[in-house]
Amino acid sequence: MGVARKSAGSIRIFGHDTEREWRQARRAIGLAPQEINFDRYLSIRDVLIFQAGYYGLRGRRVRERADALLERFGLSSRSHLEYTKISGGQKRRLTLARALIHEPRLLILDEPTAGVDVEQRLELWALLRELNADGLTIFLTTHYLEEAEELCRRIAIIRDGRIITEQPTEQLVREGERLQDVFLELVRG
């Protein structure tokens, strides 16, 4: 996304270099951060419409897209409210809707279920499965192994910016003892 400066190498998103073709690269990505960072003075619907403006999108089509996302994420009845008036799970769904307003090809999720209860977590998992089935590529960061097992085809474990291991989820889970050793190594630091 260009938020952090890389120290080496290059990054390409769907063939677009993130430095030379940063607009095209960023347009292909939807980011749902762990932190809730909405403008408290905008209605939930306006949060989505405002976000679309960052991508040069405006007009009737954006309003229709916002309404469709609010419907899909079960937020239509709350669309006129400020985000401070909705639950934690609804805030997570709004974060996802905002990340999708410009129809990205890649969705990056940072701890999407942190701070939500079990029922909301399962609802979010169902939404993520649906989005992925619709063809959206999802890059998920999580500290919950259960979540990674449930949602991911491949898992990578990263420490200090380096990939320690990366393999198909089923294979990684089968190698549980080795995985436990990797986690112990991470904890020991």
Image (spheres, rainbow, N blue to C red):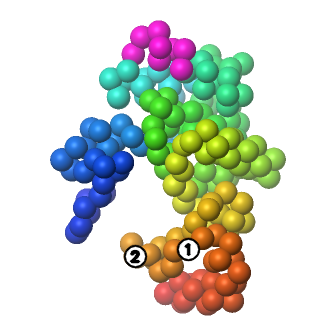
Please identify the residue farthest to the top as the structure is shown. 60
Question: Can residue 63 be seen?
Answer: yes
Where in the figure is residue 79, as x and y percent of width and height? 63, 19
Total tally of numbered discs in the picture: 2
Comes first in the chain, label 2 or label 1:
2
User: According to the image, label 2 marks what residue?
Assistant: 162
Q: Secondary structure at mark 2?
A: strand
Which picture quadrant has residue 114?
bottom right
Q: Which residue is rendered at x = 51% and y = 79% of the image?
A: 165
Report x, y in % for residue 134: 61, 38
Q: Would you say the residues marked 2 and 1 are in contact, meaning their CB atoms lie under 8 Å apart?
A: no
Q: Residues within 10 Å of mark 2 (few under 14, many from 20)?
A: few
Q: Give 84 or 99, whichever is nearer the viewer.
A: 99
58 left or right of 180 in image:
left
Label 1 crowd bin: few (<14), some (14–19), many (20+), radius 10 Å: few
From the image, tell me which residue sits under label 1: 167
Tell me: residue 125, above or below residue 154.
above
The main secondary structure of the magenta stretch is helix
Residue at the spot 67% in from the left edge and 28% down from the top edge: 72
Q: Residue at x 30, y 54 (%)?
A: 12
Tell me if I can see residue 91 in this picture. no
Residue 47 position, x and y percent, is 50, 25
The image shows residue 165, relative to residue 134, as above or below, that is below
- Which of the two marks, 2 or 1, is nearer to us in this view? 1
Which amino acid lies under the numbered mark 2 shown in the image of this protein? Arg
123 magenta-colored:
no
Amino acid type at mark 1: Gln
Which residue is found at the position 68% from the left and 35% from the top? 90
Task: Kindly identify which numbered label has been placed on residue 185.
Answer: none
Q: Would you say 20 lies left or right of 156 here?
A: left
Q: Which residues are magenta?
A: 58-65
Element under disc 1 = strand
